[in-house]
Amino acid sequence: MLLVYTHKITPRLTYTFKHFFTRILQVQVKFTTKVEEFIAHDGLKLTYSKQALGNEIFIRSTNLLFEQGINDVEIVMGKWDGVDCFFQSKQEATVSFDIFAATFYLLSRYEEYLPHVKDEHERFTAEDSIAYKYNFLDKPLIDIWAYKFKNLIKDKFPEFKFLEREFEYISTIDVDMPYTFKHKGLIRSISGFLSDLSKFRLINIWHRLIVVLGFRKDPFDTFEELINYQKKYGIKTIFFFSVGDYSTYDKNTSSRNSNYQSLIKSVADYAEVGLHPSYFSYKDEVVLQKEKLRLEAIFNRPVEKSRQHYLRLAIPETYQNLINLEIKEDHTMGYADHYGFRASTCTPFYFYDLEYEIQTPLKVFSFAVMDGTLKDYLELSNKKSFEVIVNLAYEVKKVDGTFITLFHNETISNIGRWRRWRKIYIDVFKKLATV
C-alpha cells in the first residue's frame, strides 16, 4: 500500500491518484493529512504538497487538484527524461512537474469544458486538443508517466513488490447498417433501386436483385465471420447496435424488423452487445431512454454498454444522461478525425464530472483508432492503415494497457471502398493474438 501525505484531501486528488496508482500500477492508496502518521509509516510513501517532509518521494503540487470549477489553465510543454509533460516546477522535487495535476487535466477532459469551436457534427475535434497540438496524441501519455514513476518507486523502495497487469485487445464493432440491401422495407428498397437506376449503377442493381431474391448473402451481413474471428483468435469483441428511428444520419434497419431482432439475439448469444444511440440522442435523455428500452426488449437483458453514433459526445451532458439511465460503460471516447488517445490513457477510467466535482460510476473505455478515420478522414492506404493500428497497439503493449479498435460490420464486406479491409482486420487479430 502507498501512503500519500497531502495538506488537503479533495475528490479530484483521490480520483487522480486512484487511476494513476490503483488502476494503472495496481497499487492500493491511502491518504493522510497527519504529519505524525506519515512519518511513522515505514512503507511506501509519497508527499504531494508544497514542501517535502523528509527524503520520501516528493511531488510539488500546483493548485489544480485543490480547486473547484473550470478556470483558464496555462499549458507550457516541457520534457521529463525525454517524455512530454506540463505543469513544470521550478523548485526541486522527485519529478520535475506536477504529474498528478497533468494527469487530472487530461483524464477529466478539462479542455473540453473550455470554449472551443465544434465541427459540423458539434464534436470536439482532435486538432483542438493539446495532445494533437503538441504531438502526443498517439501515445497513452498518462500510462507512460505512470510506468516511469514505477521505476522511481523501485529505486526508492526496492523491497516493494508490484502486481503486474496484462495487455488486452478489445475489438468493437459499430452496427450502423446491418444490411446494405435486405430488410430495408418496400419504400426504401424501391428508392434504392431507382437511385441506382438513375445513376446507371448497373452492378449495384444486379447485386441488389440477387441479394433481395436470396441467391447471395447481403454483403454487410458479416456477423458470422466476426463471431468466428473472436472464437479463433480469442479476442474479445463487443457489438454496438443501432435501434433509433430513421433519419438523415440514422439509416439502420427498423428495430421492429423480425430479422434484425433475430440477428441481435443471435450475436448476443456469442458476444457482448451494447447500444449505439442515434445521432440526435447525444443531448436528449428521452430519446436515449427510448432506444435503451428497445434494445433491452429485443434481447431481454439490461443494456450496460453504449457508444454514440457519429461519436457525438457532449461533455458532461451525454455522460450525465447515460448515468441517469444506469449505463455502466461508455465507449465513445475517441476522435473521428484522427487516431490516438483522446484522454491520453489506455486504461479504462471513471468519468469525473467537473460540474458536480465527483467521480461518477460511468466507466469510460477509450478506443485508439477507427476504420473510417484511416480511410475517410486521413485517406491512408491499406498498408499505412495497418501500420498505424499495429503501432498504436505496440504503444499500449509497452505499458500493458487495453487496446481498443473501432470497426464496422461493413468494413470486412470487402466491397466498394472497403476492398481488402477484411485482410486488415484479420491481420490485426493475428498480430495481436500473439503479442
Image (cartoon, rainbow, N blue to C red):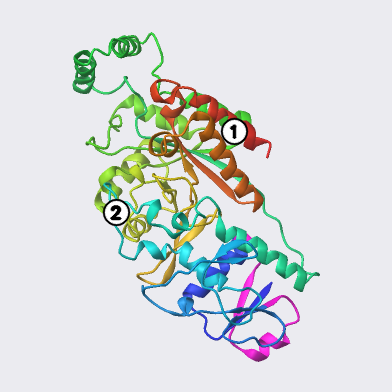
Instruction: State which mark lies toward you, 1 or 2.
Output: 2
Using the image, determine if residue 401 lies above or below residue 202: below
Q: Which residue is mark 1?
A: 429
Range of residues picked out in magenta: 24-45
State the image quarter where residue 38 is shown: bottom right
Question: Is residue 26 among what the camera can see?
Answer: no
Using the image, determine if residue 228 lies above or below residue 161: above
Helix, strand or loop at disc 2?
Answer: loop
Q: Residue 296, how many percent across, how many down?
A: 37, 42
Question: Is residue 131 among what the camera can see?
Answer: yes
Q: Residue 152, how many percent across, how many down?
A: 71, 69
| 136 vs 200, nearest the viewer | 136
State the image quarter where residue 359 is shown: bottom left
Q: Is residue 135 left or right of residue 95?
A: left
Q: Residue 212, how many percent across, how many down?
A: 31, 13
Q: Which residue is mark 2?
A: 118
Q: Residue 354, how many percent across, how many down?
A: 38, 69
| 107 vs 383, nearest the viewer | 383
| 20 falls in the magenta region | no
User: Residue placed at 56% from the left, 26% from the top?
Assistant: 228
Three-letter amino acid code of the residue under disc 1: Phe
| 331 vs 311, nearest the viewer | 311
Using the image, determine if residue 252 lies above or below residue 55: above
